[in-house]
Amino acid sequence: MRKLIRGGRGQEEIAGFAIIIIVVAVILVVFLSFSLRKPSQDIQSYQADSFVQSFLAYTTECSKTYETDYLSIRQLIEACSNNEICLDERDSCEVLNLTSQNIIKESWNIQEGSFIKGYNLDITYSGKTILSLKEGNMTNNYKSSIQSLPDRIDIKFRVYN
């Protein structure tokens, strides 16, 4: 009878040890999943920088001298700061505003259920605000791109997620 009691006690110790091993393994798996998960925010930051570069190079529908001499957004910012009028009699600031809104809405989906919750675009020329666009929910989690160009143009763009 003594041998049967000892055998039962050994099985209890092995079962306890197995439970401890399982608990430790689960904790390690959870810890590894959090530590190895790469934040998607790095991609957001890269996308914000790329967006601003592409945005500045976008060709608008405003021309100053002849019909096919269309200005880029970068050139349109300068034209707007000088209160210039496009060849088709539209105000350059109005064209900048409408074009910027269309580009952002096509590039950043902020509808309900989207990963992107909002955006904020501020453009200044020599310290004077030329354009400020905001839409959506401004959360504490964002990625931004700040560009200071040699011709006194500063662009601050934030994408909120």
Image (cartoon, grey):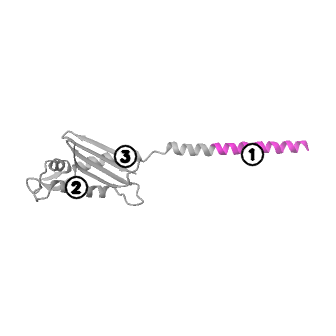
Main secondary structure found in the magenta portion:
helix
Q: Inspect the image, locate mark 1, and give the three-letter code of the amino acid beneath it.
A: Ala
**Residue kind at label 2, given as amino acid type:** Asn
Q: Which residue is more in the foreground, 86 or 137?
A: 137
Residue numbers of the magenta segment: 1-24
What crowding class fits label 2: few (fewer than 14 Cα within 10 Å), some (14-19), or many (20 or more)? some
The image quarter containing residue 86 is bottom left
Q: Measuring 13% from the left and 58% from the top, which residue is drawn there?
A: 90
* Farthest-out residue, left: 65
Q: Residues within 10 Å of mark 3 (few under 14, many from 20)?
A: many
Instruction: Residue 9 in the image: state x and y as whole percent.
Output: 82, 43
> What residue is shown with label 2?
97
Q: Quadrant of residue 19?
A: top right
Sequence-earlier tag: 1 or 2? 1
Q: Is residue 159 left or right of residue 102?
A: right
Residue 9 covered by magenta stretch: yes
- Give the residue drawn at x 20%, y 54%: 96
Per the model, the C-alpha gap separating discs 3 and 2 is 23 Å
- Mark 1 or 2: the one toward you: 2
Q: Which residue is mark 1?
A: 15
Q: Amino acid at mark 3?
A: Lys
Which residue is at the far front? 128
**Label 1 to label 2, Cα distance in Å?**
70 Å
Q: Is residue 129 magenta?
A: no
> Residue 140: where, in percent of width, then height?
41, 47
- Of pointers 1 and 3, the one earlier in the residue sequence: 1
> What label does residue 107 carry, if any?
none
* Residue at disc 3, secondary structure: strand
SS state under label 2:
helix
Residue on which disc 3 sits: 143
Q: Which residue corresponds to the image point at 24% horizontal and 47% vertical from the top-left?
A: 123
- Mark 3 or 2 closer to N-term? 2
